[in-house]
């Protein structure tokens, strides 16, 4: 078993995202701020099962327009503790699948209390805000830092204000390093401080409304296939039953909740933030407009990205993108039965949902099963560079090698990502779903791009997927 695991490490095959990580060359750095809503609790379970894929820089208690210290639903500043204690119990078994899983003590060392006293409070330099300052100013590590706001942005805003005031000469450096992914603007500090002070320096900000896919009302707009992996039978079989103490804390729907069955998925609205950072091979970290497990976005101003709205004549709001203004939330309030437009709006997120849930289920198995009894995602290597320049009329050969740590049979599928590329043409891919070798003819659209996705799925239980995105620039 030790020899198998060492070989697995050398090949970079530790899970769907682990395989892509070997291609990326370094692990993403993430720092979470959380307001402790019930869906944050659910997201924390999933987050911990992916802790092997990142360098976790912080888990910071913060606040939002919905939750702050003293509010009726406030969870306090110790709610993460039971999750870390349960994680500690399953940690030895997780190490059997990937030795990169950090210890619970390490993760505890990353927990701090940020700005929680009131909605949007950013006057106090709290320990949580100071942690963000320290991470961003550490010149020894120049990698980007994903600041994932599961609640408001007030603790992040306080940290960046301290940098602006105390280290103005480093603003441009920090703006290049920090990457924001906001689950709505859950307080006013993005508009009040971050936008006027940092947008001009190129700070990248993604503000998501597509998280509605993982939201409380998922039964109202998801297609049947995607609903199936959130429904009670799937949830109980793959996550809730017999998966150890960490999954035992996962809060699904209870009996008697209107419109839901016991065991139905509740909500993980915040999970999209860290799903975006996973190196799945879809390369969404290179451009929010390419899309991946955390959704796909369009640039609306400077380096700020919001959800794509296709409604004719639509104009994005000048201010906050949140519960009162975001297109999906406004549309949801209309309560249109079987709303095809809302379903289409959320498709950049739900298109990956089955793969996302199966990957979660595999990691739930890692909590209780040995290596040979659980599934692990295939390893994929594409022949040639992932960025290529090609000429109109050329026939481009596509080739890849796939291996599977569990010796599962692999299925290859090549497809054009029309949402991400810029050509008007649909390319015909020869052998698109039958082999590890395929080809297509380059359309005559110089200056544009064609995005080809390779999707490799194993025949394990649950089936797991690895991806590669190849970007062709036409000349």
Image (cartoon, rainbow, N blue to C red):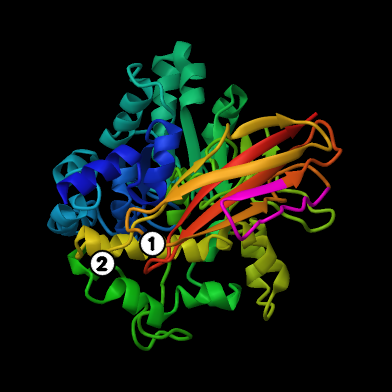
Q: Residue at x 65, y 49 (%)?
A: 438
Residues 160 and 386: in front is 386
Q: Which mark is residue 247?
A: 2
Determine the secondary structure under disc 1: loop
Residues 129 and 411: in front is 411
Residue 342's x, y, as percent? 67, 67
Q: Residue at x 29, y 31 (%)?
A: 131
Circle 1 Cα neighbour tier, 10 Å, few/some/many (<14 / 14–19 / ≥20): some
The residue that disc 1 covers is: 408
Residue 332's x, y, as percent? 63, 69
| Range of residues picked out in magenta | 425-439
Q: Which residue is most to the right?
A: 444
How far apart are the two marked residues, 1 and 2, measured between alpha carbons? Answer: 26 Å
Residues 434 and 30: in front is 434
Determine the secondary structure under disc 2: helix
Q: Residue at x 25, y 55 (%)?
A: 76
């Amino acid at each position: 078993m030790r020899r198998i695991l060492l070989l697995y490490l050398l090949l970079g095959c530790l899970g769907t995202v682990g395989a892509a990580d070997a291609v990326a060359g370094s692990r993403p750095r993430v720092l979470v701020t959380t307001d402790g809503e019930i869906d944050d609790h659910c997201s924390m379970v999933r987050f911990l099962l992916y802790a092997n894929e990142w360098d976790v820089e912080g888990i910071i208690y913060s606040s939002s327009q919905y939750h702050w210290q003293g509010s009726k639903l406030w969870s306090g500043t110790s709610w993460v503790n039971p999750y870390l204690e349960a994680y500690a119990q399953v940690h030895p078994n997780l190490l059997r699948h990937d030795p990169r899983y950090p210890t619970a003590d390490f993760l505890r060392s990353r927990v701090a209390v940020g700005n929680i006293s009131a909605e949007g409070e950013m006057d106090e330099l709290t320990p949580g805000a100071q942690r963000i300052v320290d991470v961003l100013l550490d010149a020894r590590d120049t990698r980007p830092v994903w600041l994932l706001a599961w609640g408001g942005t007030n603790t992040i805003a306080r940290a960046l204000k301290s940098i602006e005031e105390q280290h103005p000469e480093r603003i441009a450096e920090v703006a290049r390093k920090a990457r924001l992914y906001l689950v709505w603007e859950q307080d006013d500090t993005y508009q009040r401080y971050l936008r006027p002070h940092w947008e001009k320096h190129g700070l990248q900000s993604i503000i998501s409304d597509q998280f509605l896919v993982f939201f409380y009302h998922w039964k109202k707009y998801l297609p049947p296939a995607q609903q199936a992996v959130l429904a009670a039978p799937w949830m109980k079989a793959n996550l809730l039953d017999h998966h150890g103490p960490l999954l035992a804390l996962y809060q699904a729907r209870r009996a008697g909740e209107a419109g839901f069955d016991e065991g139905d998925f509740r909500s993980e609205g915040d999970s999209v933030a860290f799903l975006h950072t996973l190196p799945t091979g879809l390369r969404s970290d290179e451009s929010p407009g390419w899309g991946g497990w955390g959704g796909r976005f369009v640039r609306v101003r400077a380096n700020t990205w919001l959800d794509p709205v296709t409604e004719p004549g639509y104009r994005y709001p000048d201010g906050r993108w949140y519960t009162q203004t975001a297109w999906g939330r406004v549309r949801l309030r209309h309560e249109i039965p079987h709303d095809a437009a809302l379903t289409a709006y959320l498709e950049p997120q739900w298109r990956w949902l089955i793969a996302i849930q199966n990957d979660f289920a595999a990691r739930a198995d890692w909590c209780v099963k040995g290596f040979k009894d659980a599934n692990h995602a295939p390893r994929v290597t594409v022949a040639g560079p992932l960025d290529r320049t090609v000429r109109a009329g050329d026939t481009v050969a596509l080739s890849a090698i796939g291996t599977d740590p569990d010796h599962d049979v692999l299925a290859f599928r090549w497809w054009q990502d029309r949402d991400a590329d810029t050509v008007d043409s649909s390319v015909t891919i020869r052998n698109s779903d039958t082999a590890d070798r395929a080809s297509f003819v380059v359309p005559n659209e110089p200056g544009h791009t064609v995005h080809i996705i390779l999707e490799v799925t194993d025949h394990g239980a649950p089936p797991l997927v690895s991806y590669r995105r190849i970007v062709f620039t036409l000349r």
